[in-house]
Image (cartoon, grey):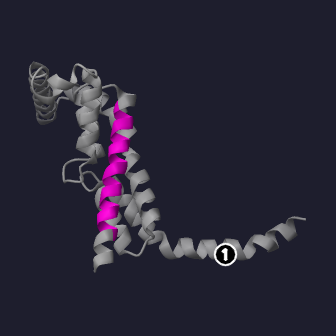
């Protein structure tokens, strides 16, 4: 019985493994580039498409792989920063202090200006937390250097935003950024 099942699917399995072996380098390159800070999925998509990977597969692979580090950063960055304070290495402690101090200054400035501009007008309709999460989404969704899942996770942690809501905003922003670069990449290749 098992022999019949195996003989029916053996050609399919060998064809699939051949395709996998042929493209493993492209897949690993795209996956690795998607997880590198500041490069992430937004720039891995054009590389994957240029290597000949199907557009939808390139988008999905880059999006999934660039989203993998986000929950780890959101969960582990605060304990790591707290651990930095306990280290006897002065430059590491100074870096943690500088990062916390800079984030605190931005947080205070943000809360001082909460009644001015667009945020003040929107405050009547939505909560401050919703506005902050929308800002986080837009920040991550912009396919520019220095914006992305890593930086968005850093901002969410330092500004003490709710983790689960931040994760959702960052992943949606990441999907948007990957989609924008995918559309630009396919549009540019169609014109050429």
* Rendered view: 147 above or below 191: above
Predominant SS of the magenta segment: helix
Image quadrant in which you'd find residue 180: bottom left
- Residue 42 at x, y = what percent? 30, 57
* Rendered view: 49 above or below 90: below
Quarter holding the N terminus is bottom right
Q: Nearer the viewer, residue 91 or 172?
A: 172
- Residue 80 at x, y = what percent? 28, 31
- Residue 18 at x, y = what percent? 59, 76
Image quadrant in which you'd find residue 20: bottom right
Q: Does residue 166 appear to the left or right of 21 in the view shown?
A: left
Q: Is residue 44 visible?
A: no
* Rendered view: 26 above or below 140: below
Please tell me whether residue 171 belongs to the stretch shown in magenta.
Answer: yes
Give the magenta range.
Answer: 166-186
Q: Does residue 89 appear to the left or right of 12 in the view shown?
A: left
Please tell me whether residue 15 belongs to the stretch shown in magenta.
Answer: no
Q: Residue at x 80, y 72 (%)?
A: 8
Quarter holding the C terminus is bottom left
Q: Does residue 59 appear to the left or right of 8 in the view shown?
A: left
Judged from the image, the secondary structure of the residue bearing numbered disc 1 is: helix
Q: Nearer the viewer, residue 44 or 177?
A: 177
Q: Residue at x 81, y 74 (%)?
A: 7
Crowd rating for badge 1 (residues with CA inside 10 Å; few <14, some 14–19, many 20+): few
- Residue 46 at x, y = what percent? 32, 67
**Residue ID for mark 1:** 14
Q: Is residue 13 visible?
A: yes
């Amino acid at each position: 019985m098992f022999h019949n099942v195996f003989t029916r699917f053996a050609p399919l399995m060998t064809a699939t493994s051949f395709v996998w072996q042929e493209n493993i380098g492209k897949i690993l390159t795209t996956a690795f580039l998607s997880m590198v800070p500041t490069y992430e999925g937004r720039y891995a998509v054009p590389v994957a498409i240029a290597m000949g990977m199907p557009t939808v597969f390139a988008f999905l692979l880059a999006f999934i792989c660039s989203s993998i580090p986000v929950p780890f950063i959101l969960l582990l960055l605060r304990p790591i920063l707290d651990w930095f304070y306990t280290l006897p290495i002065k430059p590491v402690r100074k870096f943690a202090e500088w990062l916390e101090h800079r984030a605190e200054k931005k947080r205070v400035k943000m809360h001082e200006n909460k009644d001015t501009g667009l945020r003040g007008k929107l405050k009547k309709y939505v909560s401050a937390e919703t506005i902050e999460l929308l800002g986080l989404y837009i920040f991550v969704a912009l396919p520019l250097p220095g914006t992305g899942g890593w930086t968005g996770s850093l901002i969410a942690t330092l500004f003490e935003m709710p983790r689960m809501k931040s994760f959702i905003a960052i992943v949606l922003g990441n999907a948007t950024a990957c989609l924008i670069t995918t559309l630009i990449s396919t549009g540019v290749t169609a014109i050429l």
